[in-house]
Image (cartoon, rainbow, N blue to C red):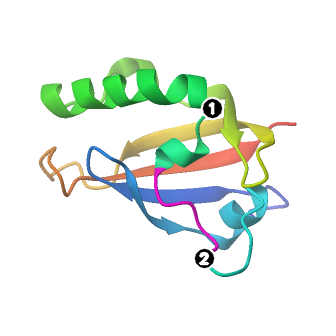
Amino acid sequence: GWGGIQVGCILARGEDLEIMSLNQTGKELLACPSDPDPSPKFVRDLLDPAFAIPHAGFLARVMRDRALPASIQHPLRNVHMRRSDGSTVQAELLVGKLDERQAFDGQTVFFAYFVPTE
C-alpha cells in the first residue's frame, strides 16, 4: 500500500471486462485463494449479483457511446465488492480507460483502483 493505505488494482479488457491483472494487494483485499487459480476471471465476479445485469447494460452503453460518462469520472464511494468467500467489502473505487487514445472495442483496457472504506 501507499503510506499504509491498501490499494487494489484491476486491469480488465473488452465489453466482458475479462480480468487481465489483479495486483497482490487486490487479491488480499478480495480474499482470493492462493490455489489453484487465485484470481476471479471477470469483473462481474466481483459484483453483487443483483448489480451484475445493470452493470452489463451500463458497460454496453459505454462501448456503444465510446465514452465514459461523467457520472463515473470521479471516485465512486460505498461500492460493495464481492470477495471470494461470498462476503463483501465496501470500497471507494476509481475507474477509467487505460489509454485514452485507444478506441472503445473488444481490446479496450479499463482500470479500477479500489481502497476499502470499512
Distance from disc 1 to disc 2, alpha carbons, whole Å, reads 21 Å
All told, the count of numbered labels is 2
Identified by mark 2, the residue type is: Asp
Judged left or right of residue 40, residue 90 is right
Q: Is residue 73 visible?
A: no
Instruction: Please give the residue where the numbered disc 2 appears in the rendered image.
Output: 37
Residue 68 rendering spot, x and y as whole percentages: 30, 30
**Residue 113, x across and y down, in percent:** 57, 50
45 within the magenta span: no
* Residue depicted at x 24% and y 24%: 61
Local secondary structure at mark 2: loop
Q: In the shown orientation, is residue 26 left or right of residue 89?
A: left
Residue 55: percent from the left, percent from the top? 43, 27
Residue 56's place in the image compared with 13, above or below, is above
Tell me: residue 83, above or below residue 52: below
Q: Which residues are magenta?
A: 38-42
Q: Quadrant of the N terminus?
A: bottom right
Picture residue at 22% right of the left edge, 30% below the top: 67
Could you say which disc has been placed on residue 48 in the image?
A: 1
Q: Quadrant of the C terminus?
A: top right
- Could you say which quadrant of the image residue 12 lies in? bottom left
- Compared with 3, 115 (above or below) is above
The answer to whether any part of residue 21 appears in the image is: yes
Label 1, secondary structure: give it.
Answer: loop
11 or 81, nearer to the observer = 81
Q: Is residue 41 magenta?
A: yes
Q: Looking at this view, is 115 or 50 the one in front? A: 50
Give whichever of 45, 25 is nearer the camera: 45
Q: Residue at x 66, y 26 (%)?
A: 77
Structural crowding at the residue carrying mark 1, measured as other residues with C-alpha within 10 Å and reported as few (<14), some (14–19) or many (≥20): some
